[in-house]
Each structure stands twice: as C-alpha cells, then as structure tokens.
Image (cartoon, rainbow, N blue to C red):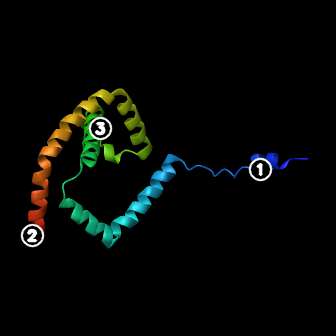
Amino acid sequence: MKTLKEMLLGEKAPIKPTKSPMQRRREMGRRMKLLAKKSSTKLKKKRALLRKRDSASLQKSAAKQAKMKVIKKALGPDVKYNELPINKRIQIDQKITAKKAAVIQKMTKKILRQLKAGEGERVKKAKLAQQEA
C-alpha cells in the first residue's frame, strides 16, 4: 500500500507534447498576419516611425543586417536567400553564425554606429512624409 507522500510525489502532471520549431514558427506567422491587419497595430507602427528607436532595437536591427550581409556574401550573387526553403535557411543561418560569429559581431558594431547616426534623419523624413500626406 502506498503512503500519502508516495502518492503525491508519484503522480506528476501529464507531459504535454512539445511542438517542433517549425510548427511554432508557422503559428507565429499566422498570429502576426492577423495582428498586421488590426487597425490598432497599424496606428502603433505609424507612431513608432515618428520616434527614435531605442538602443536595443537598433542593436537587433544591426545584428540582423550584419548576418544577412555575411550570408549573402557566402551564398554568392546567384542564390536568392528569401526564395530558399525555410529548412535550408535555418540550416544556413546556423552554419554561418557558428563559423562567422566574430565577423558578424564586428560588422554589427559598425552598422550600429551608422544606424545611430542616421536615426534622427530617418525620423525627420518620416515626419515630413506624414505632414505631406
């Protein structure tokens, strides 16, 4: 016969099956597609264009740009990265970010400086475009 302690410790919550990264990515895509259509999201995006981005988002953008430059250089001019299947893109990302991490970091710093310098100009252009519209 089991004691109360054994019964409490022995029974665990049923384990939920984990979703593959591909399923999560597709779900996120569907969710974002719906969000993009909402008027509240459109207004937030429009307002965000008129403000300077914080350093974290600039850093994220710079890292993304640096990674894409390295990937495009590695693939060559004849391969279109966006037209590749998603599994192939994930594979390329992992391979190149592992090999060229130092290069990507160095490029990120350079691009970050450029983004910070051009941020004021970007906001000015966005405000002028809004006034004209």
Q: Around disc 2, counting alpha carbons within 10 Å, would you say few (fewer than 14), some (14 to 19), or many (20 or more)?
A: few
What's the residue at 9%, 53% (across, down)? 121
Taking the image as shown, residue 63 lies to the left or right of residue 121, namely right
Quadrant in which the C terminus is drawn: bottom left
What's the residue at 43%, 61% (across, down)? 30
Amino acid of disc 2 = Gln
**Distance between the alpha carbons at the discs numbered 1 and 3:** 50 Å
What's the residue at 86%, 47% (across, down)? 3
Quarter of image, res 81: top left
- The percent coordinates of residue 63 (x first, y second) are 28, 40
Amino acid of disc 3 = Lys
Numbered disc in front, either 1 or 2: 1
Which label's residue is closer to the chain start, 1 or 3? 1
Disc assigned to residue 131: 2
Taking the image as shown, residue 92 lies to the left or right of residue 68, namely right
Taking the image as shown, residue 33 lies to the left or right of residue 7, namely left
Q: Is residue 80 above or below residue 24?
A: above
Please, what secondary structure does the residue beneath circle 3 have? helix
Q: Is residue 19 above or below residue 48?
A: above
Q: Which residue corresponds to mark 3?
A: 67
Q: Which residue corresponds to mark 1?
A: 8
- The percent coordinates of residue 64 (x first, y second) are 29, 42
- The percent coordinates of residue 130 (x first, y second) are 13, 67
Numbered disc in front, either 1 or 3: 1
Please, what secondary structure does the residue beneath circle 1 have? helix
Q: Is residue 106 above or below residue 57?
A: above
**Distance between the alpha carbons at the discs numbered 1 and 2:** 66 Å
Quarter of image, res 46: bottom left
Check whether the beta carbons of the residues at disc 1 and disc 3 lie within 8 A of each other. Answer: no
Please, what secondary structure does the residue beneath circle 2 have? helix
